[in-house]
Amino acid sequence: MSPSVEVRQLTKKYGGTTAVDGLTFSVHPGRVTGFLGPNGAGKSTTMRAIVGLDRPTSGEVLIDGRRYEQLDQPLCQVGALLDAKSLHPGRTVRAHLAGLARSNRIPARRVDEVLELVGLTAVAGKRAKGLSLGMGQRVGVAAALLGDPRVLLLDEPVNGLDPEGILWIRALMKGLAAEGRTVFVSSHLMSEMALTADHLIVIGQGRLLADSSVEEFVNRNSRSYVLIRTPEPEKLRDVLAAGNIVVEPGDGGALEALGTTPEVIGALAAEHRITVYEISPRVASLEEAFMQLTADAVDYRAKQEV
């Protein structure tokens, strides 16, 4: 499928500060694309540029081949949750959504549909100032879905959600992608992205660091191995070395075998009558891979206690 969102050599400068620097990537329909990067990496600036809130210093962003300002009914083509707190405090949930619907020539019945979809029908008459953070997030999602768009941009959508809400938004994003929509979501929660995203765009200091599937990203930027505990480490090390298996020392006298499987190690140990206490795979997480890749691209790092 052709990409729904194309970011082409996007650069955005604020005075002498370059927030985004020559960024190029595409976001395709039919999958959830996670947008990752350390604080200050340029994620929010990029998402704002996609919907025309920040004008690029150079480069461009296209949605189905057109700039956002060229779209006839923007809310019906692109739904965006960029700041869930951008609600008038005195306006009710229903009034907020109804105003958006009228401004984009969306039928009024759609307001009730999205209220039910996000689970806010019971509080539709409540004013925004009385909403919890999680409810505010749901209103933002409702607004993004109001025009039944094919492209969805969600910036930190799980902020403030309880566990049930996190499960709900995860299922919603996966369901929308399964319908063939383009879902582009930023998050700092690596564990959640590991469960939700199919593809990743990772940036650091405004530049592209990775554009790959989640599995490929983890494999490229982390170290997976098989942990072995045995009372005969030297003997097992020699056996594995003879089989061209790289072995490194681990904590507490354990061995770490690279590029192999527990089955292979177990068979070799049995063949040579070597006692083993443990043979277990250690697969790196998305968080570990992300930290490894972005270690040199962090602008704001807390001092570690000694």
Image (spheres, grey):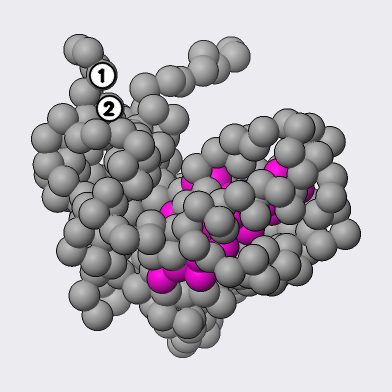
Instruction: Give the label, 2 or 1, closer to the camera.
Output: 1
Which percent across, then down, holds residue 247? 36, 59
**Above or below: residue 130 compared with residue 18:** below
Q: Start and end of the magenta stretch?
A: 132-157
**Above or below: residue 16 compared with residue 172:** above
The numbered mark, 2 or 1, whose residue comes first in the sequence reads 1
Q: How far apart are marks 2 and 1 (CA)?
A: 7 Å
Q: Which residue position is annotated with label 2?
A: 19
Q: Residues within 10 Å of mark 2 (few under 14, many from 20)?
A: many
Residue depicted at x 31% and y 42%? 52
Mark number for residue 14?
1
**Badge 2 vs badge 1, beta-carbon distance below 8 Å:** yes
The stretch drawn in magenta includes residue 29: no
Residue depicted at x 40% and y 51%? 35
- The kind of residue on which mark 2 rests is Ala
Relative to 81, 33 lies left or right = left
Label 1 SS: strand
Relative to 297, 274 lies left or right = right
Observer-nearest of 151 and 285: 151
Observer-nearest of 162 and 98: 98
